[in-house]
Amino acid sequence: MSQPPSHPSLPAPAASGNAMTAEELFRLPDDSWRALVSGELQRMTPAGFRHGTVVMNVAVPLAQHVKSRRLGVVCGAETGFVLARHPDTVLAPDAAFVRRERIPASGPLATFWEGAPDLAVEVTPPGDTRPEVADKVAAWLAAGARAVWVVDPGRRSVTLHEADAAPRRFGASDVLDGTPLFPEFRLPVADLFA
C-alpha cells in the first residue's frame, strides 16, 4: 500500500524533533480523544449530545446501505486513519467508508488504517472554525479520499467535497445522494437533524 502524502495546510512538526508516530499514538492509553497532526498530539474534548445524534443519523443509514449491498465497511467515530508519514498525521472522522476491494482478505485491521477512507464524514461541532473544517477537508482529499461530507447542524446542511469538483451544498429540503460512491443511496437531509 502506498504511503499517503503529507499535506501543506497542516501545521509543521515541533522543532524539538520529538514528533510522535502513528504507532506511538495507537499504544497510548485510551483515556481521551486524540488526533495526531504532523507528529503533534492534539487532545480533543468529547462531542456534545446533538453532535453524537447527528453522527448516528448519518452513520446508521449509510452502514445499512453499505452492508446490505456488500460495498465495504463503514467505521464509526474514533477510527484512526494515517494520512501522512514523517511526521505522522492521524485523523478520525465522525464516520468513514472504505470500499470492499481495499479491505484485506483477513478482515479489518486492528491498528489504524493506512491512508484515507473513500468517504470521510465530518459533523461540525460548535467549536470548529471554518478554517479548521477546511483544513480537515483538504487533508482528507489530499490523502486520497474520494469524497468528504461536511454535516453542519447549525446550518442544517451537508456539503459534498470531491477533489476535482466544486463543493455541492444540500439544504434541509434536499436529498443527499451517495454520488460518487453509492449512487443508489438517498437520505433526506432533514432526517439528519430530526
Image (cartoon, rainbow, N blue to C red):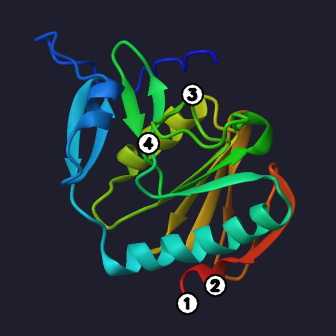
Q: Amino acid at mark 3?
A: Ala
Q: Which mark is residue 80?
A: 4
Q: Residue 182 at what x, y percent from top left?
A: 83, 56
Residue linked to disc 3: 143
Q: Nearer the viewer, mark 1 or mark 4?
A: 4
Residue linked to disc 1: 194
Q: Which mark is residue 191?
A: 2
Quarter of the figure with residue 84:
top left
**Disc 4 secondary structure class:** loop
| Sequence-wise first label, 2 or 3 | 3
**Disc 2 secondary structure class:** helix
Q: Are marks 2 and 1 in contact (CB under 8 Å)?
A: yes
- Tell me if mark 1 has few (under 14), some (14-19) or many (20+) residues whose alpha carbon lies within 10 angstroms of its own: few
Q: Is residue 28 above or below residue 85?
A: below
Quarter of the figure with residue 108:
top right
Q: Is residue 64 above or below residue 194?
A: above
